[in-house]
């Protein structure tokens, strides 16, 4: 956890400096308070996944770029979710960035685990962002167009993620799914 917070702290500060933004400006652009951004930059806070998405959207970057460095282009990667699975914040969603965002590919791939009774409503992503969900185990519900849809193992859904959507585990066992997020070029 400490390693994630340190990378996140450096990355947020770097992004802010690259844009020439003060903490005030970054707070306006991301919708995350100046105090919280300061805590993140000092490595004193573990933001929720929802806050991480706000930060990524405000800086117009991928979520995975806040969690780990981008891979070297054309680098062969073999990864195992058990080695990557982490809880970047307080909450009941585990995140394993299987493949971080690579600009030449235009996507990032996560394994997400939802604890029983967990629900997360996601704000719209940048225009043109598409998500591809594949349920691995458990039964989950996906909020699209204001309606919850039940998804079972093997079900796959592609949707425009530039509108409100959500993930919910209505059951008593964890749900594991893959989420490929594609960013428009």
Image: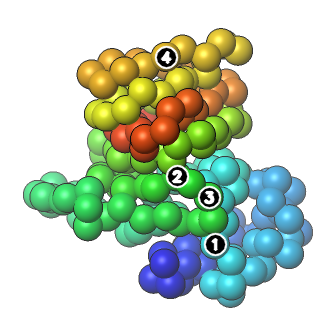
Establish if 158 lies above or below 63. above
Establish if 148 lies above or below 23. above
Residue of label 3: 91
Q: CA distance from mark 2 to mark 3?
A: 6 Å
Sooner in the amino-acid sequence: mark 3 or mark 4: 3
Residue of label 1: 46
Residue of label 2: 93
Q: Quadrant of residue 117?
A: top right
Viewer-nearest residue: 133 or 160 = 133
The image position of residue 82, as x and y in percent, is 26, 61
The image position of residue 140, as x and y in percent, is 47, 28
Q: CA distance from mark 1 to mark 2?
A: 13 Å
Using the image, tell me which numbered label, if any, was put on residue 142: none
The residue under the point 86% across, 71% down is 34
- Binning the other alpha carbons within 10 Å of mark 1 as few (below 14), some (14 to 19) or many (20 upward) gives many
Callouts 2 and 3 close, C-beta under 8 Å: yes
Sooner in the amino-acid sequence: mark 1 or mark 2: 1
Residue 61 visible in the displayed image: yes
- Binning the other alpha carbons within 10 Å of mark 4 as few (below 14), some (14 to 19) or many (20 upward) gives some
Element marked by disc 4: strand
The image position of residue 71, as x and y in percent, is 28, 62
Viewer-nearest residue: 71 or 132 = 132
Element marked by disc 2: strand
Q: Nearer the viewer, mark 1 or mark 2?
A: 2
Q: Quadrant of residue 76?
A: bottom left
Using the image, tell me which numbered label, if any, was put on residue 150: 4
């Amino acid at each position: 956890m400490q390693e994630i917070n340190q990378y996140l702290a450096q990355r947020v500060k770097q992004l802010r400096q690259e844009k020439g933004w003060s903490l005030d400006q970054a707070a306006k652009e991301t919708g995350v308070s100046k105090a919280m951004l300061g805590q993140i930059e000092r490595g004193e806070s573990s933001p929720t996944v929802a806050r991480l998405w706000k930060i990524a959207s405000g800086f117009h970057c991928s979520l995975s770029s806040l969690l780990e460095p981008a891979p070297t282009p054309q680098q062969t990667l073999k990864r195992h979710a058990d080695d990557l699975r982490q809880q970047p914040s307080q909450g009941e969603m585990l995140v394993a960035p299987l493949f971080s965002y690579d600009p030449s590919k235009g996507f990032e791939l996560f394994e997400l685990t939802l604890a029983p009774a967990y629900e997360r409503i996601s704000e719209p992503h940048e225009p043109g962002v598409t998500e591809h969900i594949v349920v691995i185990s458990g039964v989950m519900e996906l909020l699209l167009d204001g309606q919850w849809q039940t998804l079972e193992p093997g079900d796959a859904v592609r949707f425009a993620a530039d509108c409100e959507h959500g993930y919910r585990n209505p059951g008593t066992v964890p749900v594991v799914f893959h989420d490929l997020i594609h960013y428009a070029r």
